[in-house]
Amino acid sequence: MSKVLLIEDDLAVRENTAELIELAGYEVITAPNGKIGVTTAKNLLPDLIICDIMMPELDGYGVLSELSKEDSTKFIPFIFLTAKTEHKDIRKGMDLGADDYLTKPFEEHDLLSAIDSRLAKATILKEDREQKKSDEDTSNLRSLNDLKNHIDDNGTEQTFKKGEIIFNQGNHSNYIYLINKGIVKCHRIDESGKELTTALFKEDDLFGYASLLQNIPHLESATAMENCELVVIPKEELISVLNKNHKVNFDLINMLSDNIAEIKEQLLQMAYGSVRKKTAATILQFAEKMNKKNNESIKISRSDLASVAGIATESLIRTLSSFNKEGLIEIEGRNIKIIELEQLKNID
């Protein structure tokens, strides 16, 4: 039910007019003068205001002027109801921003018609303002960082425990994921049942984009390698944002290109690198994704290391043992601490 504020100092006119409006199905609030009317409007935020001009305390022009200064009340439809009929008086009210001007005495039909039309117009204008605001909010993104901030602000938060599946190979790719905390691995199972880790994603990374333009299933699975906090946004919403922000597209293309280059390097290592080089490169890759520095421990399962390196777990364990004996790393249970960073980088 729409709420109408009637500001009128004449008691008889106020009561009779309020009754007419209530019978038409509106909720009516009344105020006996302009000063009280302004306070009531600010506190209750009515859907429409009907206001007399000649009143004590504060006249109708003053009421409209005061309410026009406030963001919360400046868009409320405002109708003057008065005995002043001179053109200059009408023009003054309209210049201040009044939406309509009814003179006393008035017909019931004219009053209700003015209320109906002004409420309808206000609804249309409100929807238009909200749409423009929405367009402005999503059309000023200039970089990939702006896009991530938009996703963070407008997406849905999800949490996954360590080892929990985020999505499975073959699931529909309806969402894009932003990592706020944690590490995610994407992986596939080959025909022999062996798991191959295809990518690692860390905090502030985007993943899940099997295809932005086609509704194809995920070509790989995603699993939380540690407790993760993610923000999820529907793929259709991301496409809409990208259509309005072409500058962001270039950053996104660069990010995808970097991901492809990283995957190619990983495949080359798997195909042609020695077991030692693959193991060293994988340790360094995990250290980078987990933001670990020299002499900081990495807690990672041997099977995950082997999966990324593309070697048998037994071969990886033997190589780690060799690195440990050479003083390149230290091993304590599942923890691996890099001791000689540069030497690991230079292993052939």
Image (spheres, grey):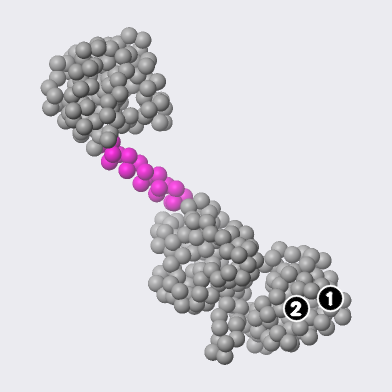
In the visual, does 48 lie left or right of 142? left
* 46 w.r.t. 123: above or below: above
Residue shown at 59% from the left, 59% from the top: 229
Q: Which residue is label 2 attached to?
A: 280
Q: Quadrant of the N terminus?
A: top left
Q: Main secondary structure of the magenta part?
A: helix
Q: Which residues are magenta?
A: 121-142
The reply to whether residue 114 is visible in this rendering is no
Q: Is 138 inside the magenta-drawn segment?
A: yes
Contact, mark 2 vs mark 1 (Cβ under 8 Å): yes
Front residue of this view, candidates 237 and 147: 237
Instruction: Identify the residue at horizontal 17%, vertical 16% (top origin).
Output: 104
Q: Nearer the viewer, residue 87 or 323?
A: 323
- Near mark 1 (Cα within 10 A), the count class, few <14, some 14-19 or many ≥20, is some
> Is residue 72 rendered magenta in the image?
no
The outermost residue toward the top is 56
Residue 4 showing in the rendered view: yes
Q: Position of residue 346 (x, y in %)?
A: 79, 78
Mark 1: amino acid:
Leu
Quickly name the residue at label 1: 328
